[in-house]
Image (cartoon, rainbow, N blue to C red):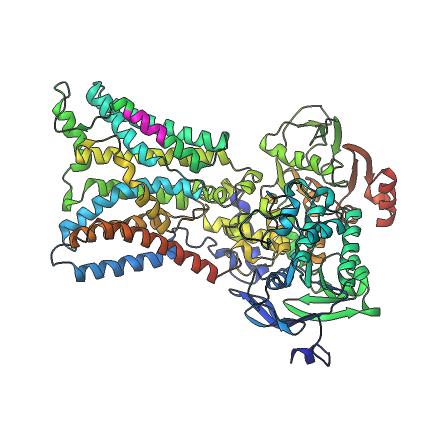
Amino acid sequence: MTESTITESSPKRANASGAAHAKVHIIRDRLGLRRAAGLLVAIAIVYVLIVLIAPPDTFASYRNTTGLLRSMSTMAIIALGTSLVIVVGEIDLSFGFLYGLAAMLLAVTWLAWGWPLPLAILAAFVGAGIVGSFNAFLTTIVAIPSFIATLGSGTLVFGITLLISDSRTYTLSSVPKAVDPATVAAFRSISTAHLPFNIPPQGLWMLLLGALFVYVLDLSLFGFRLKAIGGNPKAATVAGLPVRKYKWAAFVASSLMAATAAMLDFAFIGVAQPDAGQTLMFPVFAAVIIGGASLIGGKGSTIGTLSGALLLAILANAFAILALGAYVQQIFLGGVTILAVAIDRLAIRGSGRS
Amino acid sequence: MSAITAGAHTEPDGLVVTRVSKSYGSTQALRRLDLRAPRGEITGVAGPNGAGKSTLVGILGGELRADGGRIAIDGQPLGDSAKPDRVAVVHQEPQLFPNLAVWENVVVGHEAGLWFRPSLQEHIERLLDDFALTPFRDAELATVPLAVQQRVEIVRALARSVQVIVFDEPNSALGEAESSELFAYMRRLAGEGRVVLLVSHRLGELVEHCASVVIILDGEDRVVLRGANLTEKEVARRLAGDSSKRPAEQQRQLRSLRGESASKTLVVKGSAGSSHEKMEVRLQPGEVTAFVGVEGSGARAFVQALGASRTGERSLRFVSAEDAAVFVPRVEFVPAHRQESLFPNLSVAENIASRLAREITTPAKVVSSRRVGVVAERARLGMQIKVGAMHDPIATLSGGNQQKVAIAAAIARDPALLVLEEPTRGVDVGSRAEIYRILTEYADMGRTVCLYCTEIVEAYHAAHRAIVFQNGRVVADLVIADFENVRELSHRIVEAGWE
């Protein structure tokens, strides 16, 4: 089945069916725009409402908008990785702990052990890759459900993080004398460099990685097969798709993205703590799920995930500006997530066979 | 109103379906369907692929909601919340709890008390005994044979005093002895005054066991055959519709799939399933070979092992007959259960393309919508897949059309060896014939096609050769053309030791 036979037979087929079927583009909504349309409308409404309620020159200001872009980036970058794991029909609960491990690996090897910065960064990513591979090993080879496998590995990772860091917090404002201040400045610049229009570097990283994930998840053969595997792993095995390999890739990608987010945050905040990533657990899942991914696997899109993260960042930002108190934010976060999934369920029930 | 259109003068006993409609998006599955099934007899329902049989069963069973119309049992509308559980469906695949014991499956959902783990009550024990389930009573459901699981579904219905029992292709996976046993139970259920509905694609069985047969075409009830009109020939004639038509142009296009020339004779050696018997089977390119045998004969295990060899399973070895060289042919496998061959989250077109890589991508490994469309459209034409739109979810297709999609996905890879396990399980007559034609044409291109079937008549119609298994061994290797009719073939197979 070469390209030539395909083009050759096209006119015949059009004749046979009496319609221009051959020209029809068969894959609908591959970017997930149609599926995310409701969410984008919701974001617009929420945005307008907050602009109306918030004091002038606070929420809608340019400064706040760039801040919003930065604050959503951590959640969004991790969520991109998590979305692959969810699409392939698994779950990864270890990324919050991995975030801490990656930051501490970097800080300890670089600041305490005096490794060169590039080597320290490599150590952080290799560490994350090993944990991702370990998750995949437990899930696909030992066949432990990923929920419990990654819950276990996450806790294990946290223990290791505490061990190697001696439960310490590392700051870039007071580094040992042996560390070159120029290197520190260079490292910090990945998240603090001054870009045109005051665009936050972390926001830019998020957009670049987002573009990469549009390719990986929504356009590429890899993404197509990832969805097939998530939709029916048994049929995927019969079809000869490399189920284990793809699951491994999803777990490793999830880990690497958590490490990326940790590194960018360390560069921005200048502080690395062993337990830093753990509060990200729920918002990241909420972003992926609000973004339209199905927890049973097989569904999800990059634009959906980024939109989910944007909605959550807008809400968090608005609560801070309106000073509504932490409890309101928690209630809202839980409520919005349940609402998003409920709307999706009802929409599915409204159309198509059970 | 309904009673009059149904032709009775008083409000009739039994099941009365009046003008029931149901559509999925743009596809109209049922159009104002009427149906009457009196108590005390078995009423058959027949119809080709996509005629709406599964939708009807879904609505009767309460899994789907009709868009309009009325369903009543003894004059009382169905869906009356005061009286749930009035219809039970016995499926092709029992829908039970595989992790519970047989008796627990019977009581779950209507346990006697809420506080304690249910106990086995006397009347349930009697029912289990009636249906020869006592030996299996405490076994985990997943461990008992399919025929036993179906009896559990029946007993579960009876324990709830269900008055209407729908059998949906109940014996498509059963051997012949198990089937006749099941029909005996069905006749008994009807004899005790219940409404029994049999949805089947096996014409002989419909004619033999039903008092009347309703033919459904395109979501409408077309005709009710009973008495002298109820013959196999007449049912087939009514069912035929236009599914046998096939434009020459399409035939030619399927031929254009022809790739490289015929490969050499394959010798398959090894052992399969639990059997440790070493066996050797010769497969001829250009032929469809049917592996025949009852459950446990080893035929299914052998075909499954053939199918599994595509993923590097090493229980079987492929050897070339000419030079004794060991090699691994390109194998594609279509399992018996569609839950194992299709992706529910993907569209029809994406399912057809699901096994492909290079053929559907651009050099940058981006899946090309146009190329997926080309592959899918070719399969639709070659296999006459009835579909609303190619980007519709796979679940909007009828069972027979889903099966064609599953086969299309395997054929799209152009395997040298195409292996199918019960390729027409739960598929109606019209599509069966089409699937046989597709397989024969694929073999005509010099490919090897192997299938496992439970029915001799399927081997007769679909295959060039039949390899008969018994007790894990090959007991006969027959050329179908040597037999004048199915009866001769089955005679020879029974002689060889079938059952």
Residue nearest the viewer, comparing B201 with B275 = B275
With A344 as the anchor, is B260 left or right in this view? right
- Can residue B425 be seen here? no
Task: State how many labels appear.
Answer: 0
Above-or-below relation of B211 to B158? below
Q: Tell me which corner region of the image, top left, top right, bottom left or bottom right, holds residue B18.
A: bottom right
Residue B269 in the image: state x and y as whole percent.
71, 27
Secondary structure, magenta segment, majority class: helix
x then y, percent, for residue A353: 53, 59
Quarter of the image containing the C terminus of chain B?
top right
The residue nearer to you, when weighing A103 against B283, is A103
Position of residue B377 measured from the top left corner of the image (x, y, whole percent): 55, 54
Residue A183 lies, with reference to residue B176, above or below; the image says above
Quadrant occupied by the N terminus of chain B = bottom right
Q: Is residue B198 highlighted in magenta?
A: no
Would residue B341 appear left or right of B12 to someone viewing this image? left
Quadrant position of residue A251: top left
Q: Which residues are magenta?
A: A155-162
Residue A311 visible (yes or no): yes
| Residue visible at 35% across and 58% down in the picture | A37
B319 vs B227, left or right, is: left
Is residue A156 within the magenta segment?
yes
Residue B39, position in %: x, y? Answer: 74, 68
